[in-house]
Image: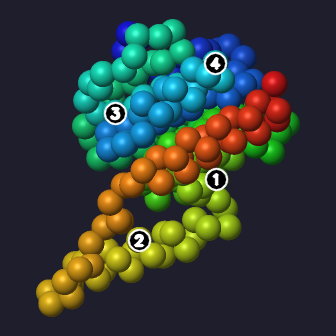
Amino acid sequence: MPDTSQPPGPQPDTPQPTGPHILVDADACPVKDEIYRVALRHAVPVTIVSNARIRTPDHPLIARAVVSDAFDAADDWIAERAIAAIPTGTAGSPIIVITGDILLADRCLKAGATVLAHNGKPFTTASIGTAIATRAIMADLRAGGEGLGGIGGPPPFAKTDRSRFLSALDEALVRLARAFP
């Protein structure tokens, strides 16, 4: 199993890949098995990024990047690769980022990447501002939340979320395969 701090494929002095590549913010990702299944069906490389070793299938299209446990190290690693993957002369990127981190989603959207939440809902340039504002409001409510009971995180992950994710990832890969053959 490749264990690397670089994604599979080109290094700085080589041409950038033209086809899709999936980067996964993996530390708290509940859909890793689904990502492997869809990516392998489409023959798309996947890089699992975490600050600790995570077991991954032994397959040449699946790589693992273990980063330091410094604050935002995995986010920085993913965002840097999303930015570096923008092909010259294009308006988008062949990168798909899977994350539940709204601020990482914002950084990757600005780089032109396709970004999906674990529940399959896409982060878009039109929706990210509202997501960031809601995140900030909820953090403020939780911080001063004595007596507010019931204000917590997102709802529990459900089968419908898993199904929506599978469909969304498949659709994103088909769209990017057409745009970046």
| Lower position in the chain sequence, tag 4 or tag 3 | 4
Q: Which residue is mark 1?
A: 110
Residue 113, can we see it? Answer: no
Q: Is label 4 or label 1 in front?
A: 4
* Residue occupied by mark 2: 135
Within 10 Å of disc 4 (Cα), the crowding (few <14, some 14-19, many 20+) is few
Name the residue: 39% across, 75% down: 136
Q: Which of disc 1 and disc 3 is earlier in sequence?
A: 3
Identify residue for label 4.
Answer: 43
Query: Observer-nearest residue: 154 or 6?
Result: 154
Give the residue pinned by disc 3: 50
Q: Residue furthest left?
A: 146
**Mark 2 falls on what kind of element?**
helix
Alpha carbon separation for disc pair 2 and 1 = 18 Å
Which of disc 4 and disc 2 is earlier in sequence? 4
- Scheme of image coloration: rainbow
Amino acid type at mark 2: Arg
User: Looking at the image, which is closer to me, 109 or 34?
Assistant: 34
Residue 50 falls left or right of residue 15: left
* Distance CA(mark 2)–CA(mark 4): 35 Å
| Residue projecting furthest to the front | 159
- Alpha-carbon distance for marks 3 and 1? 22 Å
Is residue 130 visible to the viewer in this orientation of the structure? Answer: yes
Q: Upstream in the sequence, badge 3 or badge 2?
A: 3
Identified by mark 1, the residue type is: Lys
